Image (spheres, helix red, strand yellow):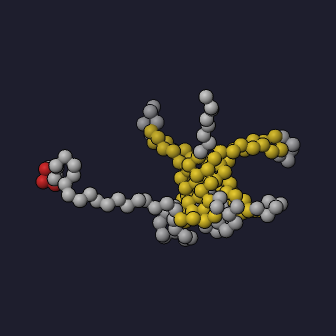
Amino acid sequence: MASRSVNKVILIGHLGRDAETAYTASQVPVTKFSVATNRRWKDQQTGEWKEETNWTNVVLWRNENVAPYLTKGKQVYVEGRLQTRSYDDKDGKKQWMTEVIAEDVILLGGRGESGPPDEGFSQEGMRSAPRPRQTAAPSGPPSGGVTDDDVPF
């Protein structure tokens, strides 16, 4: 039997800082930013509401014009994969870092925010965000012969 594995991350959160774009030695653009996600729960012992914020570093490759739109506080949808890498710090000590390598980044929020609303960025470049599908209302009474007159409210 073949073994399977999945490495998929989906985040919806707010940018913790303005995105920064740099270039590799071969002039490939790489944009980095952090996303804050919150978790809220009720403490079972005290009954108090508690909240924690998790900060996730995100890397988006080959999109050089996205940084002006990815500004601190903007809400984003990020889809990608986890990657862990190591490097030696200035003291020569090995450090490990886990980050999300983004495949899609979509700006969320209303039109009141600056920048193009509902625009997305992916490995292939800028694209429109997916729109919810509109379904046509069924014509005639619902299945089972129930009509609006049969509903008590």
Q: Position of residue 3 (x, y in %)?
A: 63, 32
Q: Residue furthest top?
A: 1
- Where is 117 relative to 46, above or below? below
Q: Where's the N terminus, which quadrant? A: top right
Res 74 visible = no
* Residue 98 occupies quadrant: top right
Instruction: From the viewer's side, name the closer residue of 42 and 117.
Output: 117
Instruction: Please state if 30 lies on the left or on the right of 121 as rendered.
Output: right
Instruction: From the viewer's side, name the closer residue of 85 and 8.
Output: 8
Q: How many marks?
A: 0
Instruction: From the viewer's side, name the closer residue of 120 and 70.
Output: 120
Q: Residue furthest front?
A: 1
Res 142 visible = yes
Instruction: Please state if 15 lies on the left or on the right of 21 as rendered.
Output: left
The residue shown at (60%, 40%) is 6
Q: Residue furthest left?
A: 149
- Where is 111 relative to 81, above or below? below
The residue shown at (41%, 59%) is 133
Instruction: Please state if 92 lies on the left or on the right of 47 as rendered.
Output: right
- Where is 56 relative to 121, above or below? above
Q: Position of residue 23 (x, y in %)?
A: 77, 62
Q: Position of residue 83 (x, y in %)?
A: 69, 45
Q: Position of residue 52 (x, y in %)?
A: 55, 44
The residue shown at (79%, 60%) is 24
The residue shown at (58%, 54%) is 78
